[in-house]
Image (cartoon, rainbow, N blue to C red):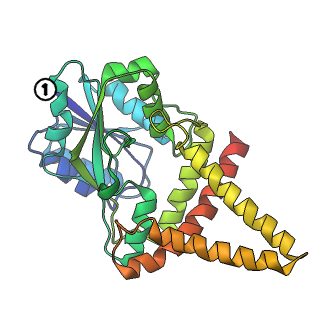
Amino acid sequence: MKVSVCITVFNEEKTIGKLLDSLLAQTKKPKEIVIVDAASSDRTVEIIKHRQKKNKRIKHLIEPGNVAHGRNTSIEVARYSIIVHTDAGCTASPDWLEKIVSPFKHKEIDVIAGFYSLAAKTPLQKAMNVFHGVPQERFEATTFFPSARSFAFRKKVWEEVGGYNEKLEKAGEDTEFIYKITRRGFRMVKVMEAQVLWNEPAEFSLKDSLKKFYQYGKGDAQAGLWLHPKKQVAAHNIKISAVFVRYLLGLLLLFLSLIKVGFLVFLSFSFLVYLAWSIFKWRDVIKDWKARAWLPVVQISSDVTVMAGFIYGKIVR
């Protein structure tokens, strides 16, 4: 089975080398690795060219544009009918490619969703990670929604759904693409064992995390996806709307507290419950009390930045 691994990059000098090394060391070798670079200004190109000298399967194209444009371009130039995605910032486990394409031996399978684990070295990183992805403890094959970090499909699927939406600036393009695939009824299987390691813990800070939260909110607003294909009202935009409702109720209580002090007491109690809930809901995933202590901070920070990104996404859409 001939496979094209397609990657988009922009200023990924800290991560692209590790990703390429992990792909070249796979138990199943990709026939080609297509990298579309949105005109990186750091050492990304130098690192890729160094790997190219050692392995001719690596193809490198410089094509300015957003992530969606890069994904579409990489698939357009890919030579083979099986497309596999991962992202810079990930490192593939040695048997990742073998496991993620294995179900394609059944001709009725169109799409395969792999999984990802999130790297963390510090308590803060452990707290941030549960807001960025699905922990293994919460993986459910029936409801898990895939990510382009670990994803494979037949090229005909991309053609039939019209590719990635290039109007989406920096986030949400893979979510919308997978929504379209799901709604069109393509046969998808999920392989938790096909894993990549996501995030570079030495470099991942709260500032980086907040930037991602902002982009998530902005991308979801621009994509305008309101119903989850499997979980219906559990779609991203409905969840973000629920965050707005919580904070608007808080502002209402704050205003009413100017009239009657009892509302301030109720607001304070509700806020403490909310902070406690941010810890309680992850009790089966995070057992380190230092990481648990960071959860309220990350909860409030993510709420604010996601709402800000969502508002901006709606304004510029």
Q: Is residue 65 at all visible to an observer of this figure? A: no
Image quadrant in which the C terminus is located: top right
Q: Nearer the viewer, residue 254 or 18?
A: 254
- Image coordinates of residue 268 in percent, x first then y, are 70, 78
The residue at the point 63 percent across, 57 percent down is 243
Residue 227, position as x, y percentages in the image: 55, 35
Count of all numbered marks drawn on residues in the image = 1
Q: Position of residue 140 (x, y in %)?
A: 32, 46
Q: Residue furthest front?
A: 262
Amino acid under label 1?
Answer: Met
Measured along the vertical axis of the image, is residue 231 above or below residue 136? above
Asked where in the image residue 52 lies, by quadrant, the reply is: top left
In the rendered image, which quarter contains the N terminus? top left
Q: Is residue 44 above or below residue 78?
A: below
Identify which residue is drawn at 68% across, 56% down.
244
Residue occupied by mark 1: 1
Answer whether residue 227 is visible to the viewer in this image: yes
Residue 147 falls in image quadrant: top left
Direction from residue 305 to residue 262 in the image, left or right? right
**95 lies left or right of 274:** left
Judged left or right of residue 287, residue 3 is left
Image position, residue 77 (x, y; %): 33, 26
Looking at the rendered structure, the secondary structure element under dot 1 is: loop
Crowding at mark 1 (Cα within 10 Å: few <14, some 14-19, many 20+): few
Q: Nearer the viewer, residue 127 or 162?
A: 127
Q: Quadrant of residue 126?
A: bottom left
